[in-house]
Structures are given as C-alpha cells and as structure tokens.
Amino acid sequence: MQMFIGRTVTGTAPIEAVLFDFELPNVDTFASFNSNGIVQYADATGGPIIPTMWHVNRPMSGVGENFQIRFTLQAGSVTAGGSTFNTWLALSTNCYILMDAVTAGRVLVEIRDIATSTVQASSRFWKKPYAP
C-alpha cells in the first residue's frame, strides 16, 4: 500500500518544491530525483515507474539548477546509489537512492533553493518495517 502525505516547509522564499511521503514496494527499487523536476520511483528490474514531481512547474528543463537536495538515512540500511547521504547535492544532475530487496530503511529527503538556502520541501520514503 502506498501512502501519500503532502508536506512542505515554509520559509521566506516562494514555495516551488513539493514532496510526498511514500512507501516503496519490497523489491529492488530506486527513487530518482531528476533535474527537470520529476521524481521517479521504480522497480530496479524494469518494473513500472511511478512518476510524481518535486517542482511545481515540472517538467521544465534546467529547473534543478536552482535547487539542492539532501538525503538523510533515518533508519535501516540503504545504498546511497548515485548520491551521498548528509550532503547537499546539486539538482542540476539526477540524484537517486537504491533499496534492494534485502536491505530496507527510511530516508528523509529535503530540497532547498540555492539563492536563500531555504528548505522548500521535505518528505520520507521507506520500506517496511521502517514506516514512520
């Protein structure tokens, strides 16, 4: 079962980013946050992709150049994949996290605008038994 809970963090800058809490299926999966404002949750073996967004005006080429993303491992064991934990990364390139069928956990995702360093959105994604 997938659970979506909208959450944004307010600041002085206009809100341009939005994220949703999301439970990943118990198979090899990844969550990719793309530079065009799209988020993709997918079965790593080529199963269906569940698209959503992180930018309110997506898809828009180059929108990620104004934003950074940070992944924080809150529980369990997760592979950082093409990204790094606990570091602000440029969203001018795609950033992703992998969760295989053996390891599981919960990851906090935050997106902030570069100009003001204001966190615009945060959410979590997880696999059982690490639901918040």
Image: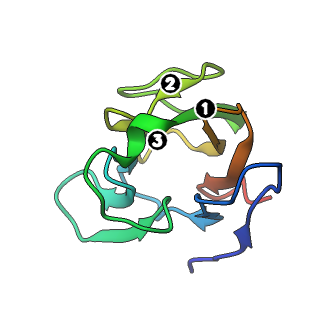
Amino acid type of the residue tagged 1 in the rendering: Arg
Instruction: Using the rendered view, name the quadrant where residue 76 is placed.
Output: top right
Give the Cα distance between marks 3 and 1: 24 Å
**Residue 68, percent from left and from top:** 54, 33
Q: Residue at x 60, y 32 (%)?
A: 70
Which label number is shown at residue 70?
1
In the displayed structure image, the side of residue 87 where residue 24 appears, left or right: left
Give the Cα distance between marks 2 and 3: 27 Å
Q: Residue at x 60, y 62 (%)?
A: 19
In the displayed structure image, the side of residue 101 where residue 71 appears, left or right: right
Say if 92 sits above or below 100 in the image.
above
Mark closest to the chain's N terminus, 2 or 3: 2
**Residue tagged 3:** 102
Using a 10 Å C-alpha cutoff, classify the residue at mark 1 as few (fewer than 14 neighbours), some (14 to 19) or many (20 or more). Answer: many
Mark closest to the chain's N terminus, 2 or 1: 1
Q: Is residue 99 visible?
A: no
Amino acid type of the residue tagged 3 in the rendering: Val
Disc 2 versus disc 3: nearer the observer: 2
Mark 2 and 3 residues: CB-CB less than 8 Å, in contact?
no
Helix, strand or loop at disc 3? loop
Q: Nearer the viewer, residue 6 or 21?
A: 6
Split into 4 quadrants, where in the image is the N terminus? bottom right
Helix, strand or loop at disc 1? strand
Say if 94 sits above or below 17 in the image.
above
**Residue 69, percent from left and from top:** 55, 35
Using a 10 Å C-alpha cutoff, classify the residue at mark 2 as few (fewer than 14 neighbours), some (14 to 19) or many (20 or more). Answer: some
